[in-house]
Image (cartoon, grey):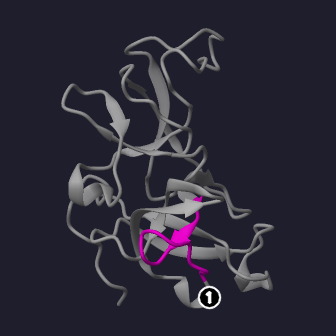
Amino acid sequence: MGARDIMPFNSPHGGHSRVYRMKVTTVSGLFCGEPVRIAAAGTVTRASNNAAATNGFFGIAMAPYAASTTKNPETGVAWADLDCIPVIVPDATSTFIGRYTVDDSTLGTPSYATIGDAVGIGMATIGGVANRFCFSDNASVKLARVVDVLDARRRSVLQGGGTGVYVVCSFAVGQTQSTTAIAAPA
């Protein structure tokens, strides 16, 4: 896993993110930017590849968490069992930026034609690091829709940017807890 795989994206047009504080257990071990789900005990833990189809999706962790090796940025001391970490929960106004894969293993090159596609949460090797979270058009459950494609300098391909590297996605409200895919565009 890697840090900052999927992050909130605020465009020049605005947008904001709703942040919840959720308890986490010492066994979770999370990186900032990783998708999380609600565990049976009511705590958050890392979601898996194709998250909604297998064990659910709740939001994106916004702080690294490992009980003895990272420090809580708010207190400056090591995390303790059942500390609360910030989690961004997708809503109708929030967008997220991440890499894109077409087959859950290899990074794809998104283009203008990718905009509007339904995507789910997948994993790929990014920068030589395996099992990095990204948006995938191969996931069996589609939770989000691509709303923009950005180049390496994070310029929109719609506004003359170069080759697509990142996708900006909006999660379908009400779909993040579901195993039902979002509808195809009309």
- Residue 171, how many percent across, how many down? 42, 62
- Residue 102, how many percent across, how many down? 46, 78
Q: Label 1 amino acid?
A: Tyr
Q: Residue at x 34, y 32 (%)?
A: 44
The residue where tag 1 is placed is: 112
Is there any visible trace of residue 119 in the rendered image? yes
- Residue 83, how many percent across, how many down? 44, 16
Is residue 152 within the magenta segment?
no
Magenta stretch: helix, strand or loop mostly? loop
> Which region of the structure is painted magenta?
97-110
Is residue 105 within the magenta segment?
yes
Above or below: residue 44 compared with residue 59? above
Residue density around tag 1, few if under 14, some if 14–19, many if 20 or more, within 10 Å: some
- Residue most toward the front? 128
Above or below: residue 127 compared with residue 159? above
- Using residue 169 as the reference point, say whether residue 49 is left or right of it: left
Q: Quadrant of residue 165?
A: bottom right
Q: Quadrant of residue 98?
A: bottom right
- Using residue 70 as the reference point, say whether residue 101 is left or right of it: left
Above or below: residue 167 compared with residue 174? below
Q: Residue at x 64, y 76 (%)?
A: 149
Q: Quadrant of the C terminus?
A: bottom left
- Residue 185, how many percent across, how many down? 37, 86
Please tell me which residue lies in front, 37 or 88.
Answer: 37
- Using residue 165 as the reference point, say whether residue 137 is left or right of it: left
